[in-house]
Structures are given as C-alpha cells and as structure tokens.
Image (cartoon, grey):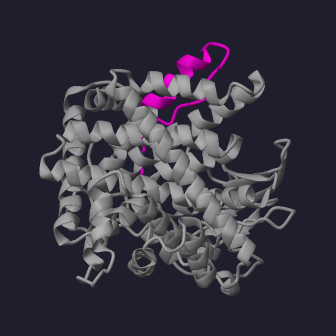
Amino acid sequence: MQINILGIDNQLPSIISNEEAQVINDLEVEFINSYHLNNGHLDDNSWLKRELVKHLPQESESECENYSEEILHTLKVLDEKQKSLADAVNKGRAKEGWFAADLQKSLANNSIQDQVKLIGTLDNAVQMANKELRETIFTSSGTVSQNPNLDGYIAEQYHAQTFNMNAEANGSGYRAEVLPLKGSDGKNGVDIVIKDKNGKIVRKYQSKYGSDSQATDKAFEKGDYRGQRRLVPKGQENGLSKKSSTVIEAPDGTTSNPLSKESAKEKQKKVQQSGEAESIELDYNEYSTKQVAKRIAQDAAKSAVLAAGIAVGSHIAQSLWNDEKIEGEKIIDTAVSTAIDSGVKAAAAGALTVVVRKGLISVIPKGTPVGIIATVANVGIENAKICAKVATGELTVLEGLNKMGEVTVSTVAGAIVGWKGAVAGAAIGTVLGPVGVVVGGFVGGTVGYIAGANVGKAVVNGVREVGSFVVDKITTGFKSVKNTAVSFFNNVLNYVTG
C-alpha cells in the first residue's frame, strides 16, 4: 500500500478505495442533510432509527432501534469521558493520573482476576495498535518504507483480524492467530491457526498469495504443508490444482472475510523489519493496577501522535469533494468550531454503520459492533476539529497533539464502560490502529468539507502541519538516538507529548 504522508502526492492509501470513500461520502452528506431537515421534530434516537430503517431494509426495525441506541449511548459515554478528562487537565491534573483513577473506578465492582484480564486486554490492544502504526509509517532506519512485497503478510493479518472481529460479534469462542516465522525463512511453517476457547489449535492454514492461480499453485509446491488447509486469494480458488479456500473457517462456521490479490496489494503496508517486535506481555504481579493504568494512558497518547503521522483521511475527503450544496452547512460549522456536535456525530456514525452493515467497505467486517463504528467516527471528527484549530492558530502543534492524546485516552476509558474483556481490546485495536485512523480521518475530513471549503481546507492544512511535525521529529531523532527501536520511539514520542 502506498501511504500518503503529509500530503506528498504518491498514491492515496487504499485501506479504503476511492469507490468505498465515495459511498461513505455520499451517505454522510445524506444523513447530515436529513438531520438538518429534521430540525428537532424527532428526538435524535427516533430520527436515527428512522434513517437506519430506511437504509438497512435487510435489518428488522427492532435491530435498527438497537443500533440507534448503541450509537447514541456510545457517543454519550465518549463525550462524558472527554469532558471529565478535559476538566481534570484544566485543573492541572495529568491525563495519566485521571485515567488511572477512572479505570479503578470503572473496575471497582469486578474481581481482581477480571480486572487483571481487562487491563491486560487493553494494554495489549493499545500497544499493538501503536506497533501497527509505527510499521505503517517507518522503517528501522527512520525512512518511509518502500517494501513492495508485503501483501502476503498483510493477507495473513487481514484474515486473522477479520475472523476475530466476526467471532467476537457472533459470540464464537474461536480465535485466529498469525504465527511468527520459524527458522531462517519460515519454510514449511504454519501461517495461521484457529484455536478454541481453551487455546487448543483446531485448524491450521498455509497462506499463499501469488499473482495468479498458477503462481499460487507453484508456491504451494515449494514446501511441505501436510496437515494445513490452503488459503488463497479471492478469485483464484477455481483455477487451482487442489482444494483451497478464500477464507479461514472455524468448526462453528465463523469465517474471515475473503481478500483478493489485488486488494492485498492495494492494502500493502510499509512494515518496519527491525528487532523491535519483542514481547509485550506484562507480568501483572510486578505492577500495581495504578502503574499499569498510567502506562496504558501514556501509550494511548503516543498512539495519537503516531496517527498524526498518517496524513491521509482528510486528503481523500478533499479529493472527492465537489462543492455540493449542503442544507446542513451551518450546523456542521457549529459542530466543528464548538462542542455542540452530538447530532453531527450521530449522523456520521449512522452513515458509517450503513456502509459497514451492507458490506460496502472491505476493511471493517460487517459484524463489527456498532459502538466501535461510532467510536471511529467520533475520534475522526474530534481530531478534525483539533487540526482545524491548529491551522487557524488557535492551538499550537504541540497543543494540538496533546489534545489528540486526550481524545485517545478518554476513548480508551470509554471502551472500558462500553465493552468488556476481548471486545474492549477489539474496539481499541480497530479505533487506534491504521484502519480506524484512515477511516476516521476520512469521516472527519468529510465533515470539515460539509462545513464549507474554508473549514475543510483548515482541516487538511492542520493535518498536514501536525503530521509534518511528527514525522520531522521522528526522522530527525533517528539520526541522534542510538538505541533499540522501542526505546527510540518512546524517547521521541515522550518528547512530542511531554
């Protein structure tokens, strides 16, 4: 995948394709216009339910009502957490201290075992999101990666992640995992396994993503993959010499989403191949809940900084905008410049929900909980508002980054209230990882353009300014810091957020 860093005109990132972006854009405009025309005649829940029923005829009315209630509840929780954190920061309290206290309060009625499990899930999810973001942007030498041959790796991760999201949504106890390479080149090793709730491996998969069915067949001939099922690109399954599948599947029927070779190439990430992929497991016997909570908050804030280095979503919105006439322009302008934005966020989240539920965007599984979708929209809009303020001089770049850090920290706190255990981890992994950053950035950028060309340009310029600062500090730091990649990134990010 070619990443558009800081507005540099290489290819737009295809985490979402131009066609998918256009669909999101059109629905977002339609939902916001509808919200404006409603003008308070229906309460937000009744209005949103009506729109979801209209756009999701395959869903029952009661299901659409559940979606509406979940979206609005999620946005309410996130707003409350964000205001609580902002109030604490204004009084001189560190966001890490606020998060630790809030986490302990949220977990007060849980057993120690459940507390440790949830904290571990959140800790792992935040750190993995950071790792994915780092690998998306930089190589170990501090340059933007140009490796063109990572689509096979991307395919493995895509299948495992979409399987786990679908399993979570369907209540399945099975989970998929991409196994690390063994030996010098990983030859004959298993790529993906599916485990039951007890951790027992029930299925093994070997993934080959050749340029066509002939190349894929040839790749399987180069190793001994007995005992493994064959996973291949969507569209190649009928041209292969042996039975193959385009998805991984558990015994209960839960599957991943299929992925074509072309889509894998489009989604190609620039993964940094360094020694930083060390264990992030934490021995909770050595840390107090408060200490670990503070670290999660610090890592969440760093995630916001890394996300700022991917200046993409708002640029896609800019490329699609055609000066459409928007009846709701005034309410959008108010939402971008003030805290009165709940209706706009509900409209954006509703539009994105329709896109996901209809399977019109490949990177977010159809079964993704609606609350996670609403959270992606919320973070994207909040960050767009912050970037606009940076562009107009209301905030400095560092102040903007710190505000973005507050958004992510309060979002993690909101996930604890909204979801439990593995679901909270899946939520944070989606929202803070590359998928959430790009999709949320696009949603936020679109809201900026709906507010008017000046606001839209301010969002894009702010994104570029903040992103340039982040990349400059990190790439410059590589020249002066001689340390492991993990320590290096921590040093630079602590400087940026501190």
Residue 293 in the image, given as x and y percentages of width and height: 54, 25
Q: How many marks?
A: 0
Task: Look at 69% across and 24% down and name the residue there.
Answer: 108
Report whether 364 appears left or right of 35. Answer: right
**Residue 192 relative to residue 76: left or right:** right
Residue 191 vs 115, above or below: the answer is below
Which residue occupies the foreground of this view, 261 or 455? Answer: 455
Residue 309, how many percent across, how many down?
Answer: 29, 49
Q: Is 224 in front, or is 473?
A: 473
Magenta segment includes 423? no
Quarter of the image where the C terminus is located: top left
Queried whether the magenta region covers residue 278, the answer comes back as yes
Over which residues does the magenta segment extend? Answer: 271-298
Q: Position of residue 434 (x, y in %)?
A: 44, 54
> Quick one: 191 or 176, which is closer to the camera?
176
Does residue 126 sit above or below 90 in this rendering?
A: below
Q: Residue furthest left?
A: 393
Q: Main secondary structure of the magenta part?
A: loop
Say if 417 sits above or below 321 in the image. Answer: above
User: In the rendered image, is residue 362 in sight?
Assistant: no
Residue 273 seen by the camera: yes
If the image is split into quadrants, where does the N terminus sit? bottom left
